[in-house]
């Protein structure tokens, strides 16, 4: 019996020593306990809100970039159209129009759409095996324009109409104006949605942090009454909640980046399919670009810092309330 | 050390729970604070460790009037007072050792500098083998001793204990009382709030008796 007791004592000693070593290796236990239900809920809420905010930011960034591309692609080209005129050599007229256009400052180059290309353009309507000479088909000259210093479109139009029979000039101005206004509206709507989502994120993060903090009242009280200074208590909680928020924000932001990369990969894999062509026509290559990723990083940081500041404010307010207890009736 | 002059306290619009309380706690003194349940013992203790502000009257702690004291000075004053709460207020996620060392940790001291000191104190209160244990595993008496050790670790000038023997059997209560008496001999002023008459009979100390918010002192 004595032997058993002795062995039990030895085992108990060994267990204590093991626990002590484990504790020493782990370092000091954080003053704010890690991982409770409220903490996990806060991580999930922050992850979801960061994901939504990053997704919205990426969407807005995509629409803004696409809108800029639509404008720029259309405004950097103009078209000269020449209708067939009885007794006139179409090729000569095309060359003449091209030469006139090239003579204008602000025109970087011109390109005559040749017969074969014109036939291909008409193929969807007129079918294959078309002899373009048999039909009075208008021909086109694409004029590339220096966006920074465009030519005087009115003078160019007047000169072409005067010198080249059957010529007309389309500077795409009507299209550009419509696109600019549509793009601006789209970006404005996107920005409004982004502002709303960020505001919702901010409020959700503030309330979720305060909720998670409520479970730690007793710790704040103990620290307060054993003489901890407000900045010490605030620092302990800030550090804990910053890490918690960063974990959630990185999960949410990371998931959003993953979505962007997946969509981008999908669009690049499906190049030349009707669906992808349609999407690419609207949104370019579906990549959110450097600004988009930078925005995601900013949102992750913003959410984490916001959580930290909310924690600080909550702790300081709570300590102030503790110091003023009982004084309200003075 | 601590002086109360005509102190009154009421919670919100309720009746006064303390009325015209005046006393002085000298350095190195030992006193019991007693009275029937609901007499205001805990409220008076809360005023003593500045967890409450009085509705009226003057409280002077270590030469400072707490009514005019800046908030930033309160932690420094509290560090000179050790408090043993009736419900212990140990942090359940920290070991007994870490709970006792907490006051030193919040003062920014390195663990290497206080480890031996904390272990020695835990041995002294009979918790040498329970250092790595979390509070939920401790018995009521062990929790009580851990709370006392935490209050004593930074050698306070005054110790306030609220019903420190309320959760322990009579032998342990006597042992704890000896511990307080020894502490008092080493220079710490002690105030024990209790309604345990047998405990008070064991030490010849000043008695502060609260009844219906009024305080009578028997030297």
Image (cartoon, coloured by chain):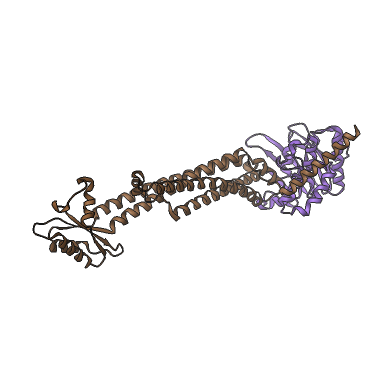
Q: Colour of chain A?
A: brown
Percent position of residue A290, x then y: 45, 55
The residue lying furthest to the left in this view is A87
The one of A251 and A93 positioned closer to us in this rendering: A93
Report the quarter where the C terminus of chain A lies: top right
Residue B150 visible (yes or no): no
Q: Quadrant of residue B169?
A: top right
Residue at 50% from the left image edge and 45% from the top image edge: A255
Residue A86 visible (yes or no): yes
Report the quarter where the N terminus of chain A lies: top right
Residue at 48% from the left image edge and 51% from the top image edge: A296
Residue at 87% from the left image edge and 45% from the top image edge: B182
The one of B92 and A151 positioned closer to us in this rendering: A151
Is B22 located above or below residue A168 in the figure? above
Left or right: A162 as drawn, with respect to A308: left
Left or right: A200 as drawn, with respect to B194: left
The one of A159 and A110 positioned closer to us in this rendering: A110
Task: Identify the chain drawn in purple.
Answer: B
The one of A175 and B141 positioned closer to us in this rendering: A175
Percent position of residue A216, x then y: 64, 41
Is B87 located above or below residue A74 in the figure? above
Percent position of residue A72, x then y: 32, 57
């Amino acid at each position: 019996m004595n032997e058993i007791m002795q062995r039990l004592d030895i085992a108990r000693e060994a267990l204590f020593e093991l626990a002590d070593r484990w504790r020493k290796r782990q370092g000091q236990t954080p003053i704010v306990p890690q991982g409770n239900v409220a903490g996990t809920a806060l991580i999930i809420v922050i992850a979801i809100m960061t994901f939504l905010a990053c997704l919205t930011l990426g969407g807005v960034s995509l629409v803004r970039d696409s809108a800029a591309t639509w404008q720029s692609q259309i405004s950097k080209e103009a078209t000269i159209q020449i209708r067939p005129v009885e007794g006139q050599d179409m090729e000569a007229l095309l060359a003449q129009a091209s030469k006139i256009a090239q003579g204008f400052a602000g025109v970087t180059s011109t390109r005559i759409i040749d017969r074969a290309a014109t036939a291909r353009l008409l193929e969807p309507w007129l079918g294959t095996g078309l002899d373009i000479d048999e039909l009075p088909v208008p021909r086109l000259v694409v004029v590339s324009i220096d966006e920074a210093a465009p030519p005087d479109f009115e003078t160019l139009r007047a000169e072409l109409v005067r010198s080249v029979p059957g010529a007309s000039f389309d500077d795409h101005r009507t299209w550009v104006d419509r696109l600019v206004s549509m793009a601006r509206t789209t970006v404005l709507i996107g920005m409004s949605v982004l502002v709303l989502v960020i505001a919702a994120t901010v409020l959700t993060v503030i309330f979720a942090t305060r909720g998670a903090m409520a479970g730690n009242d007793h710790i704040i009280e103990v620290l307060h009454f054993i003489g901890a200074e407000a900045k010490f208590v605030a620092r302990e909680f800030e550090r804990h909640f910053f890490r918690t928020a960063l974990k959630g924000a990185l999960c949410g932001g990371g998931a959003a980046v993953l979505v962007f990369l997946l969509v981008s990969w999908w669009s690049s894999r499906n190049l030349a399919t009707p669906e992808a062509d349609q999407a690419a026509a609207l949104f370019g290559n579906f990549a959110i670009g450097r600004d988009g990723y930078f925005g995601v990083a900013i949102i992750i940081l913003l959410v984490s810092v916001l959580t930290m500041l909310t924690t600080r404010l909550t702790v300081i307010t709570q300590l102030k309330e503790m110091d003023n207890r009982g004084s309200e009736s003075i | 050390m601590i002086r109360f002059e005509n102190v009154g306290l009421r919670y919100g619009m309720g009746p006064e729970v303390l009325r015209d309380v005046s006393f002085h706690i000298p350095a190195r003194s030992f006193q019991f604070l007693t009275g029937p349940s609901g007499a205001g013992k805990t409220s008076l203790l809360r005023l003593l460790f500045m967890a409450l502000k009085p509705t009226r009257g003057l409280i002077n702690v270590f030469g400072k009037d707490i009514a005019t004291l800046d908030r930033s000075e309160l932690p420094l004053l509290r560090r000179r007072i050790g408090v043993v709460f009736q419900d212990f207020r140990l942090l359940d996620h920290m070991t007994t050792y870490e709970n006792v060392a907490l006051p030193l940790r919040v003062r920014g001291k390195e663990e290497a500098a206080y480890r031996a000191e904390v272990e020695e104190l835990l041995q002294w209160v009979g918790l040498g083998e329970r250092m790595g244990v979390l509070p939920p595993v401790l018995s009521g008496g062990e929790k009580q001793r851990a709370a006392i050790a935490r209050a004593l670790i930074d050698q306070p000038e005054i110790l306030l204990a609220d019903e420190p023997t309320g959760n322990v059997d009579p032998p342990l209560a006597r042992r704890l009382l000896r511990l307080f008496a020894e502490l008092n001999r080493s220079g710490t002023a002690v105030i024990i709030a209790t309604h345990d008459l047998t405990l008070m009979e064991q030490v010849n100390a000043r008695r502060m008796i609260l009844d219906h918010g009024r305080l009578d002192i028997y030297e």
